Each structure stands twice: as C-alpha cells, then as structure tokens.
Image (tube, rainbow, N blue to C red):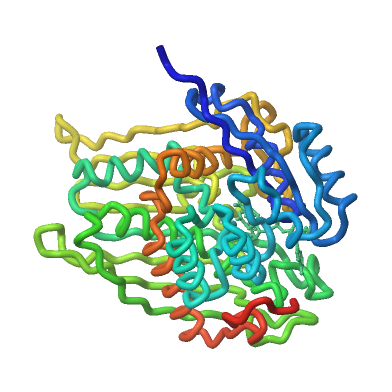
C-alpha cells in the first residue's frame, strides 16, 4: 500500500505578479499531474507594504483561511510553521531577502536571476551549507517535462555529441513607451533591470542544461565566455546599467571522447521578439544540434510545451521529424499570466507549470537534500559568473547598493 502524501508548508515572501502565479499553481492538487507522495500548503505570506496587502494576497490566491498575513519580512521569517520560503521580489532584493530567510533557519526557493552577481550567490550557498538548509534558484523551466525529455534525449546519444546550441529569449516590450518613468523592474537599474538577468537567464539556461547539466558532474568544467551588450538609454534610467540586448558566445570544454568542446550562442533583448507574431510560436527559440540531427524548442523559452526532434538519416535513409507536445496538466490555476505584458497566458484549464519546481523543492526537502541535482549550487554560481562576465564585457554595472555583500542594506 502506498504511504500518505507528506505536506510541505510554504511561506510566500512578496505579493507581486509572479508570487500570485506561483502560489495559485502551488495550490493545484498534485494528483492532477500524477504526483501522489507530496502535498503543498500555504501557511503564510508577507508584504513589505502592509499586513492588509498580505491578507488580500492570501484571499486572491485562494490560500487556506488560517494562513497568516505579515506586513514585514522580518516578522514573517520567524514564523515556526513555515518549512520553505518562496522569494518573489525583484532581482536587486533576492540576496538580502534570501539571506534573511536562511539566517532565520528557513529553506529557500528564490526566483531567478538568483542574485545580482556571483559573489552574492556564493554567500547564500555558504550560509545554506553551514546551516544545513535547502536552497534553490527558481528556474522553473528546468523541471518541465519537455526539459526532462530534452536532457534525456541528449544523454541517450541519439543525436551524437551535441556540438552547438543556440537559444534566444527576447520580447519586444517597447520599453520607452511602456516604462517612461524608468521605475519598472524590467529597466530600473536599482532593481537590477535589463534583458540579461530577466530574460537572458533563460537563453543561458538552455545552453547550460544542454551542454553542462548533461555532463557527468566529475567532468564538468567552467565555460569560456565572450559577449557584447547594448545598454538601455531610455527615459529616466542612468544609461550605464540595464541592458537592452545581450549577445553571448560560450565554449563548454569537453574531452575528445565526449565530442570535444561545444559551442553555445545565447541572445536576449527587450526590444525585438523571438516570436514576431505573438502567440504563433512558429519559429524555434532553441536549436540543440548534433551530427545526427537536432532538437528544436518553440517559444516561449521559459515555458516550453512544444518541440521537434529531427533525425537527419532515419532507418530508411530519409529524415524523420517527430512533433512533440507536452501540454500542462489541469485543472489549472485559472490565473493566466500576471506580469502585465500579456505575453504568456496559460490556456483555461491548464496549470502555469510552476508546480514542477515546487515539487522538486519538496522532494529535496523530504529526502534531506540541500540542493537539486537538476540545478546544483555550483551550476547556479557558474551561471551568475557567466552573467558577471557578460556585464564586464558589456560595461553594465548596477548601483553599488545592490552589488554589495553588506547586509542589511536600505534599498
Ligand atoms: N519564473 C517566472 O516565470 C517569472 C519570474 N519572475 C521573477 O520574479 C521576481 C519578481 O517579479 P514580478 O513578480 O514580476 O515583480 P512585481 O513587481 O510584480 O512584484 C515584486 C514584489 O516584490 C516586492 N518588493 C519588495 N521591495 C520592492 C521594491 N523595492 N520594488 C518593487 N517591489 C518590491 C513587492 O511585494 P510586497 O509589496 O508585497 O513586498 C512587489 O510586489 C523577479 O525576480 C523576476 O525575475 C517574474 C516573472 C516571471
Ligand atoms: O521570468 C520571466 O519569464 C516571463 C517574462 O515575461 C518575465 O519578464 C520574466 O521575468
């Protein structure tokens, strides 16, 4: 007989767009996606603005009526009923908010990009290690069934050693018109805005999950990075920090037996779109190429549900093209997408897909793992180092108050 599901008690730190989408997904019954050994519940939420904002949030997302509302992150992290905190503030605040939680003895799932720079990521990992806590960067895409299928197809060797990956995650956001006061987190230097940390992280995710995660951990080496950036100079921003585009070329060292070094090209932009006809998703945003064929993944790169597997020479010498779809299971959160750009709505009755990463966090905590093998601490740090290098090449430096390791900082 199977044992009853174990429950993980979540606390939600911040009440903005993604906190709402994530929490609604969290409250979808896991058995609807074939997960029977875990249950998630929400026991608390906190808002830096007021207790009433946190209370409204809990009601809006349909949390249990006894979930507690806090008007201060500092008070919230003391709540003894919380097993894990989901940190959903802007990039600029991840380091200090995640650190606050870890220092208070809480496990943490922290939104992407993990931190502003690699030094901050290393510090969070050190604290998690010392305090024996679970910590994971919330790159939800990695836990999608499609991503799992991609990694398995790569390691199966079907395509031969993957030689090159191209990945684009770009959105034509028309920032000068949409963010004229420069305060929106997509462009605001004080919130570590720009394409790279917000959208480019997904292009890098595809390079890394194809060419780094799939290698034997003992064989993995740091990649070599080259990049150029164009800095955003729209109204009311400093013109030195947030990027408009970043274009990155990476070489992943591999032994000759494993196919030799592999190349990755990652691009991202706030002003042009991967998908010129919004919602049509007809142009692949990702191509994963080996000598025997390729995988194409269709947009959006962060929420992938459609791919193609192309084998150049099938059994009868002709190419074989397999269309693959991985629909999100229902019954769904019904929330759609809440970031205000209308770029990524889940269909009525579909979950958004954020529950997959929540399941992974719960599995790790219940089995006593401090990090996820699908996105290890080492890999999150190397990706932050990669973004540091891109910003060095591109000349983008955020204000010192958000690059610092000093804590707490008044932001
Ligand atoms: N995985 C995904 O698909 C997505 C991930 N994200 C990530 O989630 C994070 C938040 O994004 P999103 O929800 O869109 O952002 P929002 O601006 O909608 O929400 C951010 C929330 O953070 C809190 N906050 C605390 N301090 C500040 C501050 N100084 N300025 C602004 N907000 C502050 C506020 O909540 P309160 O007042 O309650 O404290 C605010 O509502 C980012 O890291 C982003 O990259 C975003 C969209 C999609
Ligand atoms: O993580 C994200 O994915 C979807 C985008 O719309 C959003 O800006 C970004 O933060």
Q: Quadrant of the N terminus?
A: top left
Nearest the viewer among 27 and 307 is 27
Residue drawn where x is 55% and y is 31% of the image: 328
Find residue 75 and report its horizontal and vertical position in percent. 76, 58
Residue found at the far left of this picture: 257
Residue drawn where x is 56% and y is 27% of the image: 30
Report how many numbered discs are placed on residues in the image.
0
* Direction from residue 91 to residue 362 in the image, left or right: left
Residue 276 visible, this angle: yes
Quadrant of residue 185 within the rendered picture: bottom right
Find residue 58 and report its horizontal and vertical position in percent. 80, 41
Find residue 252 and report its horizontal and vertical position in percent. 27, 67
* Direction from residue 293 to residue 48 in the image, left or right: right
Residue drawn where x is 30% and y is 58% of the image: 211
Q: Quadrant of the C terminus?
A: bottom right
* Direction from residue 55 to residue 378 in the image, left or right: left
Q: Is residue 390 above or below residue 209?
A: below
Q: Is residue 57 above or below residue 165?
A: above
Quadrant of residue 264 within the rendered picture: bottom left
Residue drawn where x is 20% and y is 60% of the image: 218
Residue 231 visible, this angle: no
Nearest the viewer among 129 and 276 is 129
- Ligand 2 resides in the quarter of the picture at bottom right
Nearest the viewer among 87 and 303 is 87
């Amino acid at each position: 007989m199977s044992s009853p599901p174990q429950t993980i008690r979540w606390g939600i730190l911040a009440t903005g767009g993604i906190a709402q989408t994530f929490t609604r997904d969290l409250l979808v019954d896991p058995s609807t996606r074939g997960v029977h050994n875990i249950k998630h519940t929400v026991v608390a939420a906190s808002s830096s603005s007021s207790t009433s904002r946190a209370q409204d949030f809990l009601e809006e997302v349909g949390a249990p009526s006894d979930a507690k509302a806090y008007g201060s992150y500092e008070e919230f992290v003391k709540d003894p009923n919380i097993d894990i905190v989901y940190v959903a503030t802007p990039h600029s605040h991840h380091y200090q908010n995640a650190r606050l939680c870890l220092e208070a003895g809480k496990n943490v799932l922290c939104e992407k990009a993990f931190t502003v720079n690699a030094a901050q990521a290393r510090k969070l990992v050190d604290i998690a290690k010392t305090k024996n806590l679970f910590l994971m960067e919330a790159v939800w895409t990695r836990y999608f069934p499609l991503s799992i299928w991609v990694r398995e197809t790569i390691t199966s060797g079907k395509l031969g050693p993957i030689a090159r990956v191209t990945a684009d995650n770009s959105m034509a956001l028309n920032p000068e018109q949409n963010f004229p006061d420069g305060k929106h987190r997509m462009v605001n230097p004080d919130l570590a805005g720009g394409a790279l940390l917000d959208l480019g992280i997904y292009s890098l995710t595809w390079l890394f999950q194809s060419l780094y995660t799939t290698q034997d951990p003992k064989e993995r080496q740091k990649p070599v990075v080259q990049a150029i950036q164009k800095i955003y100079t729209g109204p009311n921003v400093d013109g030195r920090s947030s990027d408009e585009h970043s274009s990155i070329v990476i070489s992943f060292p591999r032994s000759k037996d494993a196919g030799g070094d592999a190349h990755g090209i990652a691009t991202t932009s706030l002003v042009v779109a991967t998908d010129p006809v919004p919602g049509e998703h007809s142009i692949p945003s990702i191509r994963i190429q080996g000598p025997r064929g390729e995988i194409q993944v269709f947009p959006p790169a962060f929420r992938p549900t459609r791919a193609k597997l192309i084998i150049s020479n099938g059994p009868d010498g002709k190419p074989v093209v397999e269309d693959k779809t991985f629909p999100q299971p229902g019954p769904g959160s019904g929330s759609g997408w809440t970031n205000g750009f209308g770029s990524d709505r889940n269909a009525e009755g579909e979950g958004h897909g954020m529950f997959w990463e929540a399941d992974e966090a719960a599995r790790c905590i219940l089995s006593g793992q401090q990090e996820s093998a699908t996105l290890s601490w080492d890999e999150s740090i190397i990706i932050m180092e990669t973004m540091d290098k891109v910003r060095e090449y591109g000349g983008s430096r955020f204000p010192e108050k958000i690059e610092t390791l000093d804590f707490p900082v008044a932001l």
